[in-house]
């Protein structure tokens, strides 16, 4: 990894929070992700499973974490299993974590090599009643590939059918949605790197530039500032392309008079940022573009103020939908009659604003969080309203990342990234 070492106290705190939620005589197991093959001997770059990283800080393949707070042996209350390094691996791939480095990274004293997993696990299973397994229960998840975690769960249930199996996800969904100060610092770092990338891309933007050239500007700044890279596949969408919500080809030439929608974020220390800006190719917005831009900006500012403790996400989105309807009437995109006759399941404003305004962000860009739970201080959300007008080859979305506070308005982690029309035009010109 390129990012600087993270203090192990963060992972020690995270484990304490998780362990406090377990039933008595319970053991929880977490696996790393696989390295996924492409073809021949090629593989995709390794990306760690966020849950084992959240609890240990270990950013390495073929790793297993076991938490057993009621273990008879003190040394077995927290255990890491790691791939043993050797001279061959060190030469060809680079040295893996030693037991000493694993302790420094995670704060876990007991480290075994992976080949000892089955032997040690057998002993632990004779002492535990409940086994917490980690299945993917994210509301947007749709995974066809069998993961290392899923293979382990099948193996474990077959090997030890007499135990009671419990889900870790309900605990993790709530814990990970509330960020520690160290986590917010990492997200802030990712946002600051995103700022550098955006300012570089902004200076490169002009008629004739290609979308992929702007993507390259972001990547240059991300890598030179120790980012993991892009937090998600970047969207650089000029003109009509901005109306395609997940446009990722980034292969069109930007034309004079168009607006480019840039939805790009850096990841740092595996923590994500998520930014969207819409900028004029020619360096200056037309009057119509300004009107649409300012309508989106007004909604964004109003929506951010609504991110306060106690708010229910569904109510929040409904209120923003009402604000959007008013703005669309002002832009003469819908009428009061359209609203009067709208389908309650698909309000009139959805024709021009079809996605949600906010989502949790953290280790995942669309991070863990129970959507029916009230918003709490310490949660981090995006705010990203947009208006999409295919008939005008115009799509505008604006997005920043906010930390909810106990009292007052949330803190904008992207406050230093140019947002107002005047500031963007000044930098471009």
Image (cartoon, helix red, strand yellow):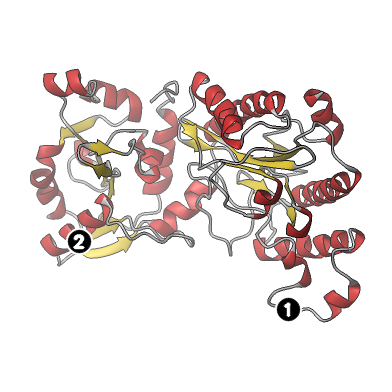
Q: From mark 2 to mark 1, how far is it between C-alphas?
A: 43 Å
Residue sitting at 59 percent across and 38 percent down?
264
Asked if residue 185 shows in the view, the reply is no
Mark 1 closeness class: few <14, some 14–19, many ≥20 residues within 10 Å: few
> Residue at image x 69%, y 49%?
384
Residue drawn at (26%, 64%), measured in percent from left and top?
165
What residue occupies the far left of the structure in this picture?
A: 119
Relative height, residue 364 to residue 208 (above, below): below
As drawn, 22 above or below 293: below
Residue 126: tell me if it is visible. yes
Q: Residue 229 location in percent, x, y?
A: 48, 31
Please tell me the numbered disc located at residue 154: 2
* Quarter of the image that includes the C terminus: top right
Tell me if 338 is positioned left or right of 250 in this view.
right
Q: How far across and down, in percent of the image, does residue 47 sit?
A: 36, 39
Please name the residue that numbered disc 1 is placed on: 344
Nearer mark to the viewer, of 2 and 1? 1
């Amino acid at each position: 990894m390129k990012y600087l070492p993270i203090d192990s106290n963060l992972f020690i705190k995270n484990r304490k929070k998780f362990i406090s939620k377990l039933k008595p005589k319970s053991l929880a197991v977490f696996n790393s992700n696989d390295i996924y093959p492409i073809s021949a001997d090629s593989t995709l770059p390794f990306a760690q499973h966020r849950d084992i990283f959240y609890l240990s800080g270990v950013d390495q393949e073929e790793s297993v974490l076991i938490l057993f707070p009621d273990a008879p042996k003190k040394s077995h209350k927290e255990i890491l299993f790691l791939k043993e390094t050797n001279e061959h691996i060190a030469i060809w791939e680079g040295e893996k974590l030693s037991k000493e480095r694993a302790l420094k990274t995670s704060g876990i004293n007991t480290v075994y090599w992976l080949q000892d997993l089955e032997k040690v696990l057998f002993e632990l299973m004779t002492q535990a009643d409940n086994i917490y397994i980690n299945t993917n229960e994210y509301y947007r998840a749709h995974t066809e590939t069998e993961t290392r975690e899923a293979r382990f769960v099948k193996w474990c249930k077959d090997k030890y059918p007499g135990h009671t199996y419990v889900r870790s996800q309900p605990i993790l969904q709530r814990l990970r949605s509330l960020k520690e100060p160290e986590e917010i610092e990492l997200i802030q770092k990712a946002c600051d790197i995103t700022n550098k990338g955006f300012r570089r891309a902004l200076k490169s933007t002009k008629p004739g530039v290609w979308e992929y050239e702007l993507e390259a500007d972001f990547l240059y700044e991300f890598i030179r500032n120790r980012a993991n890279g892009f937090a998600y596949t970047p969207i650089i969408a000029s003109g009509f392309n901005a109306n395609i919500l997940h446009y990722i080809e980034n292969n069109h030439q930007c034309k004079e008079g168009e607006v480019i929608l840039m939805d790009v974020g850096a990841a740092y220390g595996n923590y994500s940022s998520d930014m969207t800006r819409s900028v004029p190719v020619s360096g200056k917005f037309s009057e119509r573009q300004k009107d649409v831009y300012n309508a989106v900006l007004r909604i964004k500012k109003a929506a951010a103020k609504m991110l306060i403790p106690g708010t229910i996400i569904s109510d929040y989105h409904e209120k923003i939908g009402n604000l959007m309807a008013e703005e669309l009437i002002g832009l003469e995109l819908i009428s009061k009659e359209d609203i009067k006759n709208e389908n309650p399941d698909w309000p009139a404003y959805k024709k021009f604003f079809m996605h949600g305004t906010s989502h949790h962000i953290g280790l995942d860009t669309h991070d863990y969080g129970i959507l029916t739970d009230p918003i709490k201080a310490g949660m981090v959300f995006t705010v990203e309203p947009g208006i999409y007008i295919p008939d005008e080859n115009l799509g505008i979305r604006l997005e920043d990342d906010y930390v909810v506070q106990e009292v007052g308005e949330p803190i904008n982690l992207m406050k230093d990234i140019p947002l107002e029309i005047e500031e963007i035009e000044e930098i471009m010109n």
